[in-house]
Image (cartoon, helix red, strand yellow):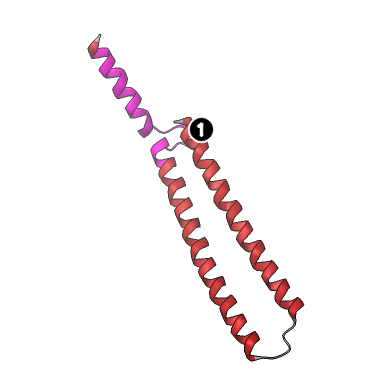
Amino acid sequence: TEMSGNVNLRRMADLGEQPMSALGNISPTDSYRMILTSVGQRISFGTTRQSSLESTMQQLRQRRDEIGGVDINEEAAKLLMFEQMFQAMAKVISSQAQAMQALLALL
């Protein structure tokens, strides 16, 4: 009947607000909100870190230009370190995206 259909629709809509043991006794809506917040914070951190690293890189270039005889191997090692940091941040963001997709699949 139409009345039972409405009740079933309401129950389905309420599922997003009900705590689930698989999610640590929080609702799917709250879990999704927490994941989004975490992803947003990590992206913000990554963006801030990237900006900071770019600023540091610019300062290093200026110092290199000011000081003759810069050790190219040392600079290459620093660049490699920065590259690895960016790759690590990309993996973190990718992992968060996968977690979000898994959560959405549960809903």
Residue 61 percent coordinates (x, y): 61, 81
Residue at 49% from the left image edge and 41% from the top image edge: 100
Within the magenta stretch, is there residue 16? Answer: yes
Residue at 53% from the left image edge and 47% from the top image edge: 96
In the rendered view of the protein, which quadrant contains the N terminus? Answer: top left
Residue at 58% from the left image edge and 52% from the top image edge: 92
Residue 85 percent coordinates (x, y): 63, 63
Residue 106 percent coordinates (x, y): 48, 31
Residue 27 percent coordinates (x, y): 41, 36
According to the picture, the residue beneath numbered tag 1 turns out to be: 22
- Work out whether residue 27 can be spotted: no
Determine the secondary structure under disc 1.
Answer: helix
Looking at the picture, which amino acid does disc 1 mark? Ala
Query: In this picture, which residue range is highlighted in magenta?
Result: 3-31
- In this rendering, would 28 be left or right of 79? left
Decide which of 100, 84 is in the foreground and name it. 84
- In this rendering, would 21 be left or right of 10? right
